[in-house]
Amino acid sequence: MAETIFVLNGPNLNLLGKRQPHIYGAETLEDVKVLCEDACLPGFEIRFVQSNHEGDLVDLIHRARQEACGIVINPAAYSHTSVAILDALMAFDGPVLEVHISQVHKREPFRHHSYVSHRADGVVMGFGTQGYAAAVRHMCQLVSGT
Ligand code: CA2
């Protein structure tokens, strides 16, 4: 049976490709989902979810404890604010990779700190939406030990 990688997306990422293409590019979140599915190695599958609600993301991370071998997460603005998401990730035993489409350190100072980075085993940023594909590939390799 295939192992499942949760790919979780935080607030406003549903607007990807519809606003601010100079920062986040022209691809939609649906395009990113396809990128992630294509990046998956055999024996793995993706569960791709977006939520604008912190508690929903916490619940999804709890669900991952039973259902996922690893978590790829773009927590969006919650990266910079959410101890709740950090705490939920701390209770997850598998690998966690954090993705940011933009290079947050070139942006406003309030984006320079991420609570999630305290738990993440790797962080990809500034690679545009291709960062998701890189994270999914790396997750498959981490989990399969290749
Ligand atoms: O670069 C990233 O991926 C971010 O996680 C995106 C977040 C931002 O708060 C982080 O600092 C960096 C924002 C996601 C909102 O995405 C939008 C996309 C299109 C239009 C409006 C918002």
Image (tube, rainbow, N blue to C red):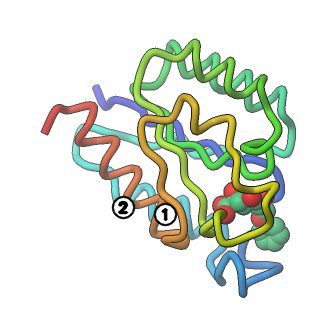
The disc label shown at residue 34, or none: 1
Q: Is residue 138 left or right of residue 88?
A: left
112 versus 17 height, above or below:
above
Looking at the image, which residue is at 47% across and 41% down? 97
User: Is 56 or 103 nearer to us in this picture?
Assistant: 103
From this viewpoint, which residue is outermost toward the left? 146
User: Is 83 or 14 nearer to us in this picture?
Assistant: 83
The image quadrant where one finds ligand 1 is: bottom right
Which kind of residue does numbered mark 2 sit on?
Asp
Q: Is disc 2 surrounded by few (<14), some (14 to 19) or many (20+) residues within 10 Å?
A: some
Q: Is residue 72 visible?
A: yes
Which image quarter holds the N terminus? top left
Q: Identify the image quadrant of residue 53.
A: top right
SS type, badge 1: helix
Residue 76 rendering spot, x and y as whole percentages: 73, 52
Which kind of residue does numbered mark 1 sit on?
Val
Residue 64 rendering spot, x and y as whole percentages: 55, 22
The disc label shown at residue 62, or none: none
Q: CA distance from mark 2 to mark 1?
A: 6 Å
Residue 114 rendering spot, x and y as whole percentages: 68, 43
Residue 136 rendering spot, x and y as whole percentages: 39, 50
From this viewpoint, which residue is outermost toward the bottom? 22
Looking at the image, which residue is at 49% across and 71% down? 127
User: Is 105 or 6 nearer to us in this picture?
Assistant: 105
Q: Is residue 134 left or right of residue 17?
A: left
Q: Is disc 1 surrounded by few (<14), some (14 to 19) or many (20+) residues within 10 Å?
A: few
- What residue did someone put label 2 on? 38
